[in-house]
């Protein structure tokens, strides 16, 4: 810092105080980024008018001969963690890491810890086979600035509530909950520290499923109990009461997730939860957790929201058990928050840890539908303030949902995901998109420190409508291709409108 000696003492004091405050802001931003599990380097000074405006803010306005060099804090870090995430089976180049990095993804969901493989036999003291963990993937995630949501799943047969059960995803026996807590302490001790630095721990995967509905050795839940009015949520809470203190005792900054609730139908709609007798019970699983006192024993509610390709629908996509929904993301988030609010835990953040549009057949029309789904689904996620939304998956044959083919070549949905992350990755939700003709709906997003705005719009009923763009605006399709003209046709295909 250089200061003219002719300045009064009070001016010098004020300038020094300004420098200290600015430095504190940068330090707080750095610590915040570290707590999220990824480094946040300072961005270069933007070019053009925005950069000039920032430069003007850090120069002395009173004495032309005096220049004070302060840290650039405007847009030097992203104002919030982007919601964009992907599930990966291996976090490596062979597993698609290069393609993931090209999208500026921040979250990786990873099926990291299978208790049945790490501790297949109970010994005293316990023996943990850490060789069963893909540690190279965890290190690769950390080295590439990715935050891992680590799923802890499957139980050894000796720990099951019903040891004769063919499913390893089921409830842990009450007598083995101490051993599970001991296992968690060992896992968090090892993997919350460098070089892994795991901070997010998801306990199970779709636990709100009764094992009678599943096949052997599946990858789902399955803590659901169709004989219980709250579908087994109370017993899951019993596990949380042992697991949560064990994790926090090792790492107080750790974040514990309820394991990705399926929520297979909307219980508020009398037409949705029909059919087999179990259908109206799974949505009560979360309430069962809260009724049993489990509210203080988790940090984040994880849930899943899928849509299906439906060529007969105006939007060509739907969710049959959440009627009237296109993505089901806002509807499920609203339902979860209603339940949380009822028990005084409405402040808990939410993560959608699996999202995709399912294609029974990989037709060209359905694969393009997946690409159209991306701006809607991620726009919805930001509109309801999700902490993360994880696409399933980087590669997957399940309903053809992968972003990439097995040979790692991109599918249309990958290019749409990359475009959405580029446009919206550091955006802030501003409300519903306005200023468009009747029948055009969507979301408006802004950016910290600049006036630029991005709207994501589409035709609500799917029919084509003419849209005159606001003066000075430009429009782009789901792949980021410029749409020519001052007026554009808009259908169910989402369009990005960049507004000055």
Image (cartoon, rainbow, N blue to C red):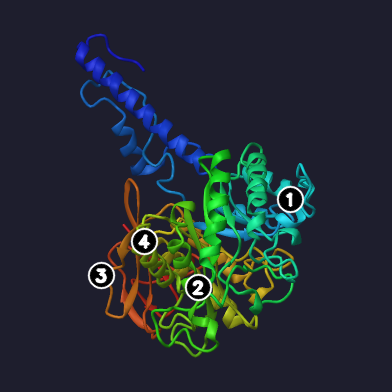
Mark 2 and mark 1 lie on one chain; the one further toward the N terminus is 1
Evaluate if marks 3 and 1 touch, with contact meaning CB atoms under 8 Å apart: no
Q: Earlier in the sequence, mark 4 or mark 2?
A: 2
Other-residue count near label 3 (Cα within 10 Å), few / some / many at <14 / 14–19 / ≥20: few
Say what secondary structure mark 4 lies in. Answer: loop
Residue 134 - label: 1
Q: Residue at x 67, y 69 (%)?
A: 396
**SS assignment at label 2:** loop
Residue 206 % position (x, y): 58, 67
Alpha carbon separation for disc pair 2 and 3? 35 Å
Q: Which residue is mark 2?
A: 263
Neighbourhood count class around disc 2 (C-alpha, 10 Å): few under 14, some 14–19, many 20 upward: many
Circle 3 sits on which residue? 435
Give the tally of numbered discs.
Answer: 4
Badge 3 marks a residue whose secondary structure is loop
User: For this rendering, which residue is in front, 454 or 82?
Assistant: 82
Is 442 drawn above or below residue 463 in the view shown? above
Of residues 36 and 145, the one drawn nearer to the viewer in this rendering: 36
At 50% from the left edge and 58% from the top edge, which residue is drawn? 421
In the rendered structure, which disc, 4 or 1, sits on the residue that comes first in sequence? 1
Of labels 3 and 4, earlier in sequence is 4
Label 3 and label 4: CA atoms lie apart by 39 Å
**Distance of label 2 from label 1 (alpha carbons):** 30 Å
Residue corresponding to mark 4: 343
- Above or below, comparing residue 66 to residue 243 in the picture: above
Question: In the image, what residue occupies the spot 37% across and 84% down?
Answer: 461
User: Is the C-beta separation of discs 2 and 3 under 8 Å?
Assistant: no
**Of the residues under marks 3 and 1, which one precedes in the sequence?**
1
Disc 3 to disc 1, C-alpha distance: 51 Å
């Amino acid at each position: 810092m250089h200061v003219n000696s002719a300045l009064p003492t009070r001016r010098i004091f004020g300038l020094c105080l300004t420098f200290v405050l600015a430095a504190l802001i940068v330090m707080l931003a750095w610590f915040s980024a570290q707590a999220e599990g990824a480094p946040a380097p300072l961005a270069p000074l933007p070019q053009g008018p925005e950069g000039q405006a920032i430069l003007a803010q850090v120069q002395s306005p009173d004495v032309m001969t005096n220049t004070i060099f302060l840290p650039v804090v405007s847009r030097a870090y992203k104002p919030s963690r982007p919601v964009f995430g992907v599930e990966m089976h291996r976090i490596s180049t062979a597993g698609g890491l290069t393609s993931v990095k090209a999208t500026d993804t921040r979250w990786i969901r990873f099926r990291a810890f299978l208790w049945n493989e790490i501790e297949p036999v109970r010994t005293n003291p316990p023996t943990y086979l850490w060789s069963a963990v893909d540690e190279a993937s965890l290190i690769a995630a950390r080295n590439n600035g990715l935050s891992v949501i680590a799923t802890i799943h499957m139980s050894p047969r000796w720990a099951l509530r019903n040891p004769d059960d063919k499913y390893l995803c089921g409830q842990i026996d009450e007598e083995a909950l101490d051993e599970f807590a001991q296992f968690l302490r060992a896992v968090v001790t090892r993997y919350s520290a460098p070089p892994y630095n795991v901070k997010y721990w998801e306990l199970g995967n779709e636990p709100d499923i009764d094992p009678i509905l599943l096949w052997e050795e599946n990858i789902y839940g399955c803590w659901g109990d169709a004989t219980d009015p709250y579908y087994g949520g109370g017993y899951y809470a019993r596990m949380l009461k042992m697991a949560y203190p064990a994790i926090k005792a090792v790492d107080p900054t750790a974040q514990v997730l309820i394991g990705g609730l399926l929520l297979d139908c909307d219980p508020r709609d009398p037409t949705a939860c029909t059919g087999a007798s179990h259908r109206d019970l799974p949505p009560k699983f979360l309430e069962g957790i809260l009724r049993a006192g489990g509210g203080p024993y988790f940090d984040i509610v994880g849930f899943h929201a899928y849509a299906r390709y439906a060529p007969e629908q105006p939007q060509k996509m739907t969710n049959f058990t959440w009627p009237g929904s296109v993505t089901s993301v806002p509807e499920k988030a609203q339902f979860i928050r209603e339940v949380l609010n009822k028990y005084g835990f409405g402040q808990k953040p939410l993560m959608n840890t699996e999202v995709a549009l399912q294609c029974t057949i990989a037709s060209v029309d359905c694969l393009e539908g997946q690409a159209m789904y991306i701006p809607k689904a991620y726009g919805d996620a930001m509109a309801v303030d999700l902490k993360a939304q994880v696409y399933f998956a980087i590669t997957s044959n399940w309903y053809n949902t992968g972003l990439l083919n097995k040979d790692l070549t991109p599918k249309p949905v990958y290019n749409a995901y990359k475009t959405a992350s580029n446009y919206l990755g550091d955006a802030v939700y501003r409300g519903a998109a306005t200023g468009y003709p009747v029948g055009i709906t969507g979301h408006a997003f802004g950016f910290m420190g600049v006036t630029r705005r991005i709207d994501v719009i589409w035709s609500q009923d799917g029919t084509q409508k003419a849209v005159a763009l606001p003066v000075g605006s430009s429009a782009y399709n789901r792949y980021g291709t410029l749409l020519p003209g001052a007026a554009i046709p808009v259908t169910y295909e989402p369009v990005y409108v960049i507004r000055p």
